[in-house]
Amino acid sequence: MVRHISEILGKGAISFSFEFFPPKTQAAAGNLFKSISELTPLKPAFVSVTYGAGGSTVGLTHDLVTRLQRETELTVVSHLTCVGTTLDGVRGILDSYYADGIRNIMALRGDMPKSGAPAATDFRYAAELVAFIKKSHPDMGIGVAGFPEGHPETPNRLKEIDYLKAKVDAGADYICTQLFFDNHDFYDFRERCELAGIKIPIIAGIMPVTNKKGMLRMADLALGARFPGKMQKALSRADSDEHYANVGVHWATEQVLDLIENNVAGIHFFTLNDSKATLRIYESLGVSNSAGLSG
């Protein structure tokens, strides 16, 4: 199924979508496609596939994206990063995706690889990548990242919104935010975007905490992420991984309910390639698929 992101988000209903990352082993691939098969009945508006730091999973990402495009009815969004890329390399990736029927890209600056700076980077900022995609394939849908709690490398919150506006002006169709645990941060971010003249849909990124190790990993991956004291207090009472997950799913469910009531454009679940938490959120909300949430 080939659908442009503007078509999906332009219907007026809240969109619900899922994110996956490319597996590195056959066993991981089997687990991923089991999760995808379990989540597909939830009827997501689209699914996205991530890149590794410095574009380290470019081949794996391409393989997963094209397989999903070929073997499922899902609308697929592929991540594409600036770090470690060249003009010719990006052009080749876009042309290949286009030939395979992929029409939606999530344009990101990306993280530096742990081994240090990559050999070549022709795109310094995501706004430059957005402009290049728009010029080379004008009918491709483009998403960009937003940071409700602030970008860890941009402490000046005024400049942060200016940089986001540059991505929007370059041709972005929507914004998907970094994870957050306090909806007030999202609402404040949305209001500041409105004041800056940013009028494209803003999708809220939600990642439920399912275990203590995962929470610590989130703190590392989402630098600057704020874990509200009320949530930490609730998690501190959990005496097993099962109870820890119960608290995390409950917290995420309450976030989703509040976002729906406050007219969010969409909600994007970071699944970590595991269907259990997302399925439990839908179950807690009392619906069998996304149509029940947005209807």
Image: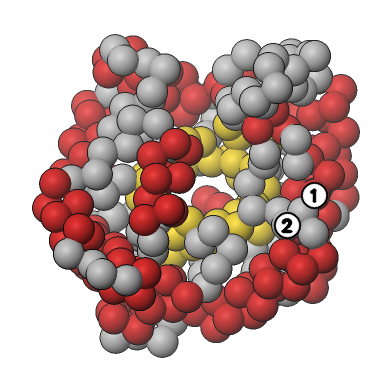
Residue 214 location (% of width, % of height): 43, 53
Residue at horizontal 77%, vertical 68%? 27
The N terminus: image quadrant: bottom right
- Find disc 2 in the rendering and name its residue: 23
Residue 20 location (% of width, % of height): 60, 57
Residue 48 location (% of width, % of height): 60, 54
In terms of depth relative to the viewer, which is nearer, 78 or 239?
239
Q: Amino acid at mark 2?
A: Pro
Label 2 sits on a secondary structure element that is: loop
Sequence-wise, the earlier of marks 1 and 2 is: 2
Between label 1 and label 2, give the one nearer the viewer. 2
In this view, 132 is above or below 156:
below
Residue 209 visible at all: yes
Residue at horizontal 65%, vertical 25%? 114
Is 294 left or right of 42, judged from the image as shown? left
In terms of depth relative to the viewer, which is nearer, 65 or 22?
22
Q: Are marks 1 and 2 in contact (CB under 8 Å)?
A: yes
Q: Amino acid at mark 1?
A: Leu
Is 40 left or right of 132, judged from the image as shown? left
Where residue 63 sits, quadrant-wise, is bottom right
Label 1 sits on a secondary structure element that is: helix
Residue at mark 1 to residue at mark 2: CA–CA distance: 7 Å
Dot 1, how many residues are within 10 Å of its Cα: few (below 14), some (14-19), or many (20+)?
some
Residue at horizontal 18%, vertical 36%? 188
Is 246 left or right of 66, judged from the image as shown? left
In this view, 133 is above or below 262:
above
Residue at horizontal 80%, vertical 49%? 60
